Every structure is written in structure tokens, then in C-alpha cells.
């Protein structure tokens, strides 16, 4: 039997905590030596707890996730602000938020699908170049043309 689940863990603590118990992550394995008739019980453990990892890495990941949510909510708020109060402040805020949101999103796609050290370095360099060119282009458009807010209004007016 791979794992033994006690009914009391389900009854007293709820079903949700059942899946997070570290005792369920241990898998017993019985092996035999070729020269001997004795069996040995080995236990392979899978560490599912974030407390076993470095604290600074999980803190940085948590702050990054929080930053992504803040930028997403900021983009939701900038939509109505761009409609009701078009101007340079909103244009440049949109340029920064859109670029950062796109940079983080494409970065996650690269993390999921690009493998191998040289490929990852080239993909990240390309991503930083793309993000820099995007932000510079949006700032150039805001400074030398009508801006993002008025450009979208012009697209909707026709």
C-alpha cells in the first residue's frame, strides 16, 4: 500500500488539509539485496513545503506576484481614467503599465516553453529588447503624436 490515510485526519481537520499532509508525501519502497534474503524499507520523501526552501526566494516570488496583481488592477482603473481624463499623465501611465504587463506575461510564456541555458538567455535578452523598444515607442507616440488615449478615441470615432 503506497500511503495509509487515517479517517480521523479527514474528520477533525477537513478534507482540504488531507492533501497537504507531509505524511502523505512519503512513499514506502521495499527492495531486496541480491546476496541477502532480507528486505529493507526505504522511504522517498517529496518536499512540498515552501518552508524548506530559501526564505528570500519565496518572498521575492510573493512580491512579484503581488506586483503583477497591482499592475493588472491599475490597468483596469486606467481604462475609465483614459476615457474621462485623457492627458499626458494617463498616456505615460498607460505606456508604463502596458509595457510592464506585457513584459511579465511574455516572460511567463518563455519560462514555460523555453528550455536550455543558452536559449533562455537569448529569449530573455530578446524580451528585454522588445520591452524596451515597446516602451520607447509608446513614449515617442505620446510625445510626438496625439497620445494613446486620443488615438484610441480616434479609432472608436470612425
Image (spheres, rainbow, N blue to C red):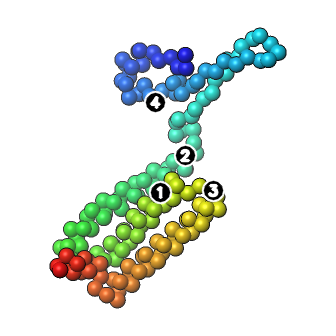
Residue farthest top in this picture: 37
Which one is earlier in the sequence, the residue at label 4 or at label 2? 4
The CA span between labels 4 and 3 is: 32 Å
Q: Nearer the viewer, residue 16 or 119?
A: 119
Which one is earlier in the sequence, the residue at label 3 or at label 2? 2
Assess disc 3: are there few (<14), some (14-19) or many (≥20) residues with their C-alpha within 10 Å of its C-alpha. Answer: few
Q: Mark 2 highlights which residue?
A: 55
Q: Is residue 87 visible?
A: no
The CA span between labels 2 and 1 is: 22 Å
Q: Mark 3 highlights which residue?
A: 116
User: Do the CB atoms of the residues marked 4 and 1 lie less than 8 Å apart?
Assistant: no
The CA span between labels 3 and 2 is: 26 Å
In front of the other: label 2 or label 1? Answer: 1
Q: Mark 1 highlights which residue?
A: 108
On the rendered image, what quadrant is the N terminus found in? top right
Which one is earlier in the sequence, the residue at label 4 or at label 1? 4
Q: Secondary structure at mark 3?
A: loop
In front of the other: label 4 or label 1? Answer: 1
Q: Nearer the viewer, residue 52 or 123?
A: 123
Say the numbered circle drawn on residue 152.
none
Assess disc 4: are there few (<14), some (14-19) or many (≥20) residues with their C-alpha within 10 Å of its C-alpha. Answer: few
Q: Secondary structure at mark 4?
A: loop
Is 67 above or below relative to 56?
below
- Find residue 38 and report its image quarter: top right
Say the numbered circle drawn on residue 20.
4
Amino acid at each position: 500500500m503506497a500511503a495509509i490515510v487515517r479517517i480521523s485526519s479527514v474528520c477533525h481537520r477537513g478534507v482540504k488539509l488531507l492533501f497537504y499532509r507531509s505524511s502523505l508525501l512519503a512513499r514506502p519502497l521495499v527492495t531486496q539485496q541480491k546476496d541477502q534474503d532480507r528486505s529493507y524499507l526505504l522511504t522517498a520523501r517529496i518536499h512540498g513545503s515552501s518552508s524548506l526552501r530559501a526564505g528570500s526566494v519565496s518572498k521575492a516570488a510573493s512580491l512579484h506576484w503581488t506586483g503583477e496583481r497591482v499592475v493588472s488592477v491599475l490597468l483596469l482603473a486606467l481604462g475609465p481614467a483614459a476615457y474621462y481624463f485623457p492627458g499626458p499623465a494617463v498616456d505615460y501611465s498607460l505606456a508604463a503599465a502596458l509595457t510592464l504587463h506585457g513584459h511579465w506575461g511574455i516572460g511567463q510564456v518563455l519560462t514555460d516553453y523555453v528550455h536550455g541555458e543558452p536559449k533562455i538567455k537569448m529569449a530573455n535578452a530578446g524580451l528585454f529588447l522588445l520591452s524596451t523598444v515597446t516602451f520607447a515607442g509608446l513614449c515617442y507616440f505620446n510625445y510626438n503624436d496625439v497620445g494613446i488615449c486620443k488615438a484610441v478615441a480616434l479609432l472608436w470615432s470612425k
